[in-house]
């Protein structure tokens, strides 16, 4: 009689243990699935955040470069104007001024610290942007000078 009770207890405990193991593995599968979904979500969110940060950094950097180029070109033009006679103005003088100003802007900007991997543009594009900004600024200042 004692053996039968022990056998029944063993069967009951074993069935409870098997049920608990089955429940554990079901919960583990759900947890793994939720972890996977969470990782996918955070990865997408990180990529979206990274794209937003890159865009914002690029906009701010380009705006700063254009503002700096305009300011330095203006200063250089007025210094050049004060040291040269405007009635003896030649195309060669203007080209030389633009080239020198472009070179000064490029040297003055600390382009070594620009992380181009975190921007939407390349070093060459920055150089083109500086040259265009300097040229347009000097052109506008010349137009004002002769109005």
Image: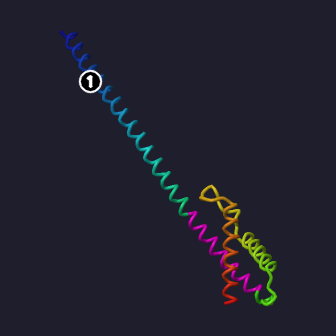
Residue 54, horizontal then vertical, whole percent? 55, 59
Disc 1 residue crowd, few under 14, some 14–19, many 20+, Cα 10 Å: few
As rendered, which of 114 and 137 lies closer to the eye? 137
- Which residue is under mark 1? 16
Q: How is the image coloured?
A: rainbow
**4 inside magenta stretch:** no
Point 79% across, 85% down: residue = 89
In which quadrant of the rendered image does the C terminus lie?
A: bottom right
Point 42% across, 39% down: residue = 36
Give the left or right position of residue 57, taking residue 71 as reference: left
Question: Residue 110, located in which quarter of the rendered image?
Answer: bottom right
Give the left or right position of residue 4, taking residue 118 as reference: left
Question: Residue 20, located in which quarter of the rendered image?
Answer: top left
What is the magenta range? 57-80
Magenta span: chief secondary structure: helix
- Total marks drawn? 1
**78 inside magenta stretch:** yes
Instruction: Say above or below: 6 vs 139.
Output: above
Give the left or right position of residue 73, taking residue 47 as reference: right
Give the left or right position of residue 52, taking residue 73 as reference: left
Residue 113, horizontal then vertical, whole percent? 68, 63
Question: Residue 99, located in which quarter of the rendered image?
Answer: bottom right
Point 77% across, 85% down: residue = 80
Residue 12, horizontal then vertical, whole percent? 23, 19
Element carrying mark 1? helix
In which quadrant of the rendered image does the N terminus lie?
A: top left
Residue 77, horizontal then vertical, whole percent? 73, 83
Point 56% across, 63% down: residue = 57
Instruction: Say above or below: 129 vs 118.
Output: below
């Amino acid at each position: 009689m004692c053996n039968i009770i022990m056998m029944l207890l063993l069967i009951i405990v074993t069935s409870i243990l098997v049920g608990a193991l089955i429940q554990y593995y079901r919960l583990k599968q759900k947890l793994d699935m939720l972890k996977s979904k969470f990782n996918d979500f955070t990865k997408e969110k990180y990529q979206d955040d990274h794209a937003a940060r890159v865009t914002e950094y690029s906009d701010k950097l380009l705006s700063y470069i254009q503002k700096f180029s305009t300011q330095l070109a203006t200063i250089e033009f007025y210094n050049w104007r004060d040291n040269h006679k405007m009635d003896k103005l030649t195309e060669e003088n203007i080209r030389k001024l633009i080239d020198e100003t472009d070179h000064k802007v490029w040297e003055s900007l600390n382009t070594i610290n620009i992380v181009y991997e975190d921007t939407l543009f390349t070093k060459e594009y920055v150089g083109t942007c500086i040259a265009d900004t300097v040229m347009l600024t000097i052109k506008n200042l010349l137009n004002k000078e002769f109005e």
